[in-house]
Amino acid sequence: MLVTPAAPASAYVRYRSTDGCPYGWRMRDLPITGYPQGLAGLDEGQIANAATQAALAWSKGSDALGSCTDLDLQVTMQSLDVPAPVAKYDHQNILVFRGDAWCPDPIKDPANCKDAYALAITSVFAGTKSGEIFDADIEVNALKWTWGDLVTTPDSGIKQDLQNALTHEMGHFIGLDHTCYMFDAKHPRPVDNNGNPVPDCSDPTLSDSIRATTMFASADPGDTSKRTLEPDDQQAVCDSYPIGRPDPMECSSVGNSSGCALASPPSPEASAGIGRSSLWAGIASAAIALTLWAGLRRARVRGP
Ligand SMILES: [Zn+2]
């Protein structure tokens, strides 16, 4: 029995720090370096276009956002012969494609194994108290999944659309969480911007408006709908990064007594946590879907 009520319209979810502060970048111009190596089926130009358009969806140049925000995600692509670096907390925002190491060593290093059904994962490194984001890395699962540009070259339903997934991941990049909740014993159900508990992803009564959001947690093969932001997603970026705010950081205290002081943290290295979320592959097969839902998790672990 599912008892979580459907969230109202215009709901979005932000990661929050241990003090309840929403995750956010202090900078508005956010560089992302992309490394196209490791992704088969698309050429460099197609990969660059997918990444650039995905970034634009959340940026001030987007027609859909109008003039509500001055956020600007700026993608620079490296050439194919440049090896992809490791995603880690190093103040370098990267987009990489993992074609051979989604799970480098399942026996010796199981902690670094990502779920095979994850399409992509974004690790967001932020101050554990302030929520200020210092680094974010996007990794695409090019080992299990086949990627394409399914608008220019529609597919029968086998492939995943790269721009679709990257637009979702860039929502995580700017600090947004999923609009539905996958049970995770380690992480309580978050609340949305209206203060309502986020509904279960598996709730059959989930509203179409939530399922349609770019920040919904799964994508079916062939899905291209996440390329464009829904009203909820648009509201998220407009509220989180409004144009003209002198200090782009904000902190609306949520049940804490610290006041979420936003003074510079003593040391990013000492205070960084990770919000790590995946875009999951929606699969029609009931058997696989059971595996999918049973295996769903969102890792949020402390950094050093
Ligand atoms: Zn996600």
Image (spheres, rainbow, N blue to C red):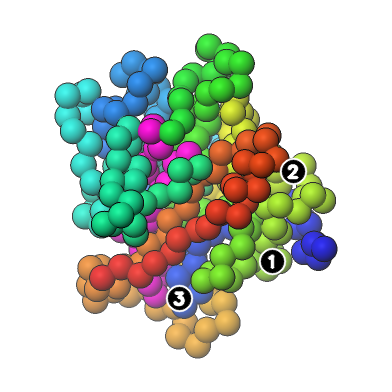
Label annotation for residue 222: none
User: Is tag 1's residue or tag 2's residue first in the polypeptide sequence?
Assistant: 1
Which residues fall within the magenta stretch? Answer: 119-143
Crowd tier of the residue under label 1, counting other residues whose Cα lies within 10 Å: few below 14, some 14–19, many 20 or above = some
Q: Residue furthest top?
A: 153
Asked whether residue 10 is in view, the answer is: no
Residue tagged by mark 3? 18
Label annotation for residue 209: 2
Q: Secondary structure at mark 2?
A: helix
Quarter of the image where the C terminus is located: bottom left
Q: Secondary structure at mark 1?
A: loop
User: Is tag 3's residue or tag 1's residue first in the polypeptide sequence?
Assistant: 3
Task: Please identify the dominant SS of the magenta region.
Answer: strand
Return the x and y of residue 113 as percentages of the image width and height.
36, 51
Amino acid type at mark 3: Thr
Amino acid type at mark 2: Ser
Callouts 3 and 1 close, C-beta under 8 Å: no
Above/below status of 208 relative to 196: above
Crowd tier of the residue under label 2, counting other residues whose Cα lies within 10 Å: few below 14, some 14–19, many 20 or above = some
Q: Secondary structure at mark 3?
A: loop
Callouts 1 and 2 close, C-beta under 8 Å: no
Return the x and y of residue 2 as percentages of the image width and height.
80, 62
Q: Residue furthest left?
A: 82
Quarter of the image where the N terminus is located: bottom right
Return the x and y of residue 293 as percentages of the image width and height.
62, 51
Q: Which residue corresponds to the image point at 71% horizontal and 66% vertical from the top-left?
A: 196
Q: CA distance from mark 1 to mark 2?
A: 16 Å
Q: CA distance from mark 3 to mark 1?
A: 17 Å
Amino acid type at mark 1: Pro
Residue 81 figure quarter: top left
Residue tagged by mark 1? 197
Crowd tier of the residue under label 3, counting other residues whose Cα lies within 10 Å: few below 14, some 14–19, many 20 or above = some
